[in-house]
Image: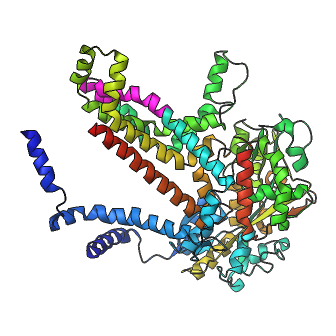
Amino acid sequence: MRQEATGFARETGQGRPPGRAGWLLLAPLVVWAFAFVVAPAAIMLVYSFAQRGTLGGVVLDFTFENYRGVVDPVYLQIVIRSIVYAGLTTAICLAAGYPVAYLIGRAEQRWRNLLLMAVMVPFWTSFLIRTYAWVTILKSEGLLNSLLIQLQLIGAPLELLYTPGAVVLGLVYTFLPFMILPIYSSVEKLDGALIEAALDLGAGPLRAFSRVIVPLTSPGIAAGVLLVFVPSLGIYAVNDILGGGRVDMIGNIIENQIKGNARNWPFGAALGTTLLVSFAIIYFYVNRRQRAALVR
Amino acid sequence: MTRIASVLLAALVGGLAPLAPASAEELNLFAWSEYVPQSVLDGFTKESGIRVNYETYASNEEMLAKLLSGAANYDLVQPSEYTVEAMVKEKLLLPLDHAKLSNLKNIGKEYYGQAHDPKLAYSVPYMQGTVGIAINTEKVKEPVTGYADFFQPKYKGRLVVLDDALEIVTWALASQGLGPDAVTKANLEKVRPILATWLPLVKVYDSDSPKTALLNGDVDMGMVWSGEAAILIQEQGKKFAYVLPKEGAHMFIDSLAIPKGAENVPGAHKFIDYVLRADVGRKISEEFPYTNPNLEARKLLTPEERANAASYPSGNPKLQTFRDIGTVAADVDKLFTDMKAKSGG
C-alpha cells in the first residue's frame, strides 16, 4: 500500500514544472549554479579556443592549437601520471576506508556519532596546515625518523619526504574522509536481515560480503570513488609541499599557465575543459552502471 | 528570473559595502608576499592618514593575471625588472612624477641605466637581490664556485633549486657562456641536454621558501634567492655560506610602480616617497635582508648586516638582469615541464 502511494506521488510529481513558489524556492540554487558553475565553465570553454595575449590574458581568435597541446607527449605523460596517482589514491582510500565505514555504520548508535566525529575532526584545521604537519613528521630530522632511530630500527634517516610515496600518502590522508562518509551512509541503511538470510542460506562470510553487502553499498562506493578520484586528479598543493615540486600533476601544469612563467591562459583553459569533460563522462558512466545494477 | 538575480546581487553588494568606510583615503598595494613589513604600512598610515590595503602575490605572472582580469584596482604594484619592461611595452604603467619623490636621490646610481627602465621613469627600485648558491658548509667540504660545481652527480638528492622555469633555463645558458638575453627557441634546444643531466640531481623545487629544506637538513645546497640565504647566514652564520656563480648570476630588481587605472595616484607617490626614506628603508632591510638600493638606508645598517655576503656580496661578481622574453616564455615552461617529468620523481 505504502509502496503504491509513493509510486503514485512520484509519477504525478515528476514532469510537472514547478509553480511560482517552486521557482522562488529554487532561485538561490539556480543563481548559485549559474554564477559559479555554468558561467565559469562557459568562460573556460571560450578561452580554450582563443589565443594567448602577450602578457597573459586572451585574444579572442578561434584556434584548436590549445587542444593539440593537450595531446602533446610532453603534457600527455603528466596527464597519465596524474591518472595513475589519482587511481592509486582512490584504491588505497577504498581499501582503508571501507572497513572503517562499515564498522562505524554497524556500530551501536551511541558510538556512531562519536566515531563519525573522529573522522571529521581533521577538517576543523586548515588543509594546508595539516599538509605542512606531514613535512614535520616526514623530514630527514623529523618525528618519524627520530622515533625509528631512537628505537634502533634504522641507523640512518630514511628518505621519506619529497618522494612520490609522500605525495600518495598526502593525497590519501586528504581524501580518506570523502570515501568513508558516503560508504558509511550506505552501510547505515543496510538491512541486517539480508545478511543473516544470506548466511542462513549457506553463503560463507566472503560470499555474503561479495554478493550481498558490496552490491547493497555500491551507491556509497561509487560516490566515494568519484569524490576521491576527481579532486585528487586536479590537486596541486599536496604534490608541491610533500613532493618537493618534483611530481607535477595536471593541476600544477594548469597553475603554471596562469601563475607561472608560461602566461598561456588559453592552454590552461583547454586543460581545464578536458578535465571537466572527462569527469562528466566518468560521472555518467558510473551513474548508468549504478542504475543498471539497481534494476538487476 | 534575471530580476531575482539582480535583487539577490544587490542584497549581497549592499551587505558588503558598509565594511569599507568611504571617508578615509585608501591605497591599494599589490605586492609580493613577505616583502613589505607591517611596521612600514602602519608607519605610513600614521603619518599620512592613508589606509593601506596590502594584497599579496607569489609570482610576477600572478600579479599580471589579476591586473589583466580587471577584477580589482590597484594603486601600486611591485614587478621585477623583466615584468616592468613588459608592462611598459604594453603601456600598463603610469609615468612617475619625480617632483613628488623628494627621497629618490637616496637610490644608488647603479640602479639607473638598467635596460628595463633606464631613467626610473616608471619604476623605483624597492629591493634588489641575486640568485646564488647557499651552502651548508658542514656537509659540503669541496669549494663550489658555479653551476658546474653545483650540479654534480655526487650531490644527487641533496639539492634544492627554485621552482622557476626561466631561472633554471638561464643557469643552463650561463653554463654555456650565454646571458639571460639569449633565451630563444634555438638556444632552448641547446639547453635541453644540460637540463637532462641536472634535473635528476634535484631533490626539491621550491620558490616560496627554499631555505626550509636547507634548515630541515633535507638538502645540503640550494640555488636560492639571496634574501633567503641572508636569513640562513643571519641565523647560523657558521654553518651556511653564499656564493654567486662565477659563470654569471641573475640580479633581480623588484620595483614599486603605478599601474594604469590606479585611483589614488597622489597617494601612491606618497607611499613610494615614504619607502624611499632612509629610516623606512632600514626597517625593510631588517625584516627582508635583500640588497637595499637605498644608499642612505644602507648607512643605518649594523656592521653584521653589511657583512652578510648574501645581502652585500664582495668583489665584482658577474650579474645580469632578465629581459622580457615575450611568448618564448611558453616554450621555456614546456621544456622545463618535460625535463622535470622525464627526470623521474
Q: Is residue A251 above or below residue B70?
A: above
Residue at horizontal 79 percent and vertical 53 percent from the top:
B305
Q: Is residue B33 visible?
A: no
Quarter of the view holding residue A183: top left
Viewer-proximal residue among B226 and B260:
B260
Quadrant of residue A289 within the rendered picture? top left
Where does residue A272 sit, x and y in percent of width and height?
53, 58
Q: Horizontally, is A242 left or right of B279 in the view?
A: left
Farthest-out residue, left = A1
Q: In the displayed structure, would residue B94 be above or below residue B137?
A: below
Q: Which residues are magenta?
A: A92-115
User: On the rendered structure, is B125 left or right of B62?
Assistant: right
Residue B226's spot in the image, x, y percent?
78, 54
At x 58%, y 78%, the residue is B267
The image quadrant that residue B319 belongs to is: bottom right
Q: Is residue A109 magenta?
A: yes
Q: How is the image coloured?
A: rainbow
Q: Whole-percent x and y of residue A188?
A: 27, 31
Query: Looking at the image, can residue A294 be seen?
Result: yes
A109 or A99, nearer to the observer: A99
Give the overall secondary structure of the magenta segment. helix
Residue at the front extreme? A296
